[in-house]
Amino acid sequence: MTVERTVRLRFGYTSRIAATHSNLSAIRTDGRVLWIAGDETATVERLVADDEHHPTEYDRQTTFRLADLVDLPGADPDAEADIEGLARSGPFLWAVGSHSLRRKQIKARHSGAKALKRLARVEGQDNRQILVRLPITDVGGLPTPTDAVVVDGVSHRAAVLAGRDDLRALLRDDVHLGPFLAIPGKDNGLDIEGIAVHGDRVYLGLRGPVLRGWAFVLELRPYADAHRPDRLRLRPFDDGSPYRKHVLDLDGLGVRDLCPAGDDLLILAGPTMDLDGPVRIYRWHGACRVELPAIARSEELTRELELTYGEGDDHAEGLAVLGPVEDGRLLVVYDSPAEARLAEEDIVLADVVCLPER
C-alpha cells in the first residue's frame, strides 16, 4: 500500500476519555463533514474539514447521542452500541451496530480457574442490535442529525429497525447464519461491520461468519412504518424473504467495512478472528445493480489494494471515498492505532490511499 498522505482527526476531551479516538470503527465523508463512530459509545461524531477539496485536518467535533434521536433497545441509553458502519444517502445518515455477542477476555491478572471461567462468559448488549436512520438537516451550513425533517412536503422521522423485523430474530432460522448467532463475533459468530446505501438498497457487510472462505453481505429494503414512523420495516423481496444474501470470495477474509463507489461497492476485508491481517480492499463490480442473490467470484471481484497492519495495533476499520469517486482517493481509519498515529494528545492520523487506475 502506498499512503499518499495523512490527515489529522482532532477529538475533544470527552471523546478522548471515552476512548473514541482509539476505537474508531466507522467513517463516512459528507462534503466538508466527516462522520465518525467508535465501538465503545452510543454516539455519532461530526468533524469538519479545514479544506473540503484537500483536507489536512478535521476538527470542530460535535457529538450526537443516538438516544436523543431514537429509542434504543438497551435499559441504559448510553451503553455502547458498537457502531460498526455509517452510510450517508439522500436526506439520511445511517448507522448499524455489530449485532454480535462478545466473549470476556483473559487479562494479565487472571490465571487458573478464574481465567477459564472468564473465557467461558458470553454476553450480548441490546444497544448493539440496531439499524438506525437519522434525518439530516442544515444547521449553520453543516449537515446535522435531527429527529424529523420535511423533504418535498414529506415528513421523515428518525427511525430504528425493531420488533418483528429485528435482524437477529429474522436470522434465527437461516440455514447459513442461524447456527452462528450464539457464537461471539470474534469467534466467527455473527458480526456486522459495514453498511452501504444505494437508493432504497441497504447493504450490510458481515465480518463473520465466513463459511469455507465465503463472506456474506446482506441486502435489505427498509422503509418507515406508516403507522409508526419512528420504526423501520423491511420490504420483502420477490421470494418473500425480508433480506437477500450475497456470498463473496474474499480469499477467506470477512467484511470490515463497505463503501459505495457509483454502482460498485468497495469492500474493506480482514480476518474474522482476532488476528492482525491480512487487510485488503476489494471492488465488487456492479454490486448495486444485482437483482438476484450473487455468488461473487474473481469475475465480479477485484483486489484493489493491500493495506499494511501492525502487530496488535493499526487495524483498518473504516473506509470512505475522499473527494470525487473518479479520483480514486480513500480515507482509512484504524482501530487500536499505533503510537505513531497518536500525533498529539487530541489528534489521530488517518491515511489517504489511492486506488489503482482503471
Image (cartoon, rainbow, N blue to C red):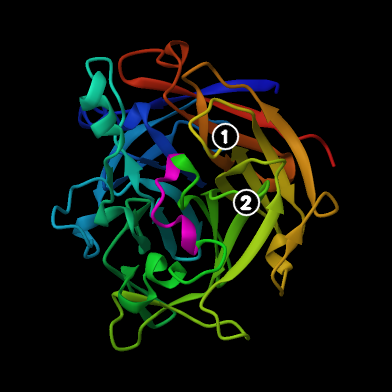
The amino acid pointed to by label 1 is Leu
On the rendered image, what quadrant is the N terminus found in?
top right
**SS for dot 1:** strand
Which of pointers 1 and 2 indicates the residue nearer the eye? 2
Q: Position of residue 91 (x, y in %)?
A: 44, 65
For residue 279, say whether it is visible.
yes
Q: CA distance from mark 1 to mark 2?
A: 29 Å
Q: Nearer the viewer, residue 314 or 186?
A: 186
In the orientation shown, which residue stands out farthest toward the bottom?
A: 227
Q: Which residue is mark 1?
A: 331
Q: Examine the rendered structure and indicate whether residue 65 appears above or below residue 319.
A: below
On the rendered image, what quadrant is the C terminus found in?
top right
In the rendered structure, which segment of residues is drawn in magenta?
178-186
Q: Nearer the viewer, residue 13 or 210?
A: 210
Q: Nearer the viewer, residue 45 or 209?
A: 209
Q: Examine the rendered structure and indicate whether residue 145 appears above or below residue 153.
A: above
Q: Which residue is mark 2?
A: 211
Name which quarter of the figure residue 80 lies in: top left
For residue 323, say whether it is visible.
no
Q: Residues within 10 Å of mark 2 (few under 14, many from 20)?
A: some
Who's the residue at 63% across and 40% down the image?
253
Pointer 1 or 2: first along the chain: 2
Q: Residues within 10 Å of mark 1 (few under 14, many from 20)?
A: many
Q: Examine the rendered structure and indicate whether residue 17 appears above or below residue 310.
A: below
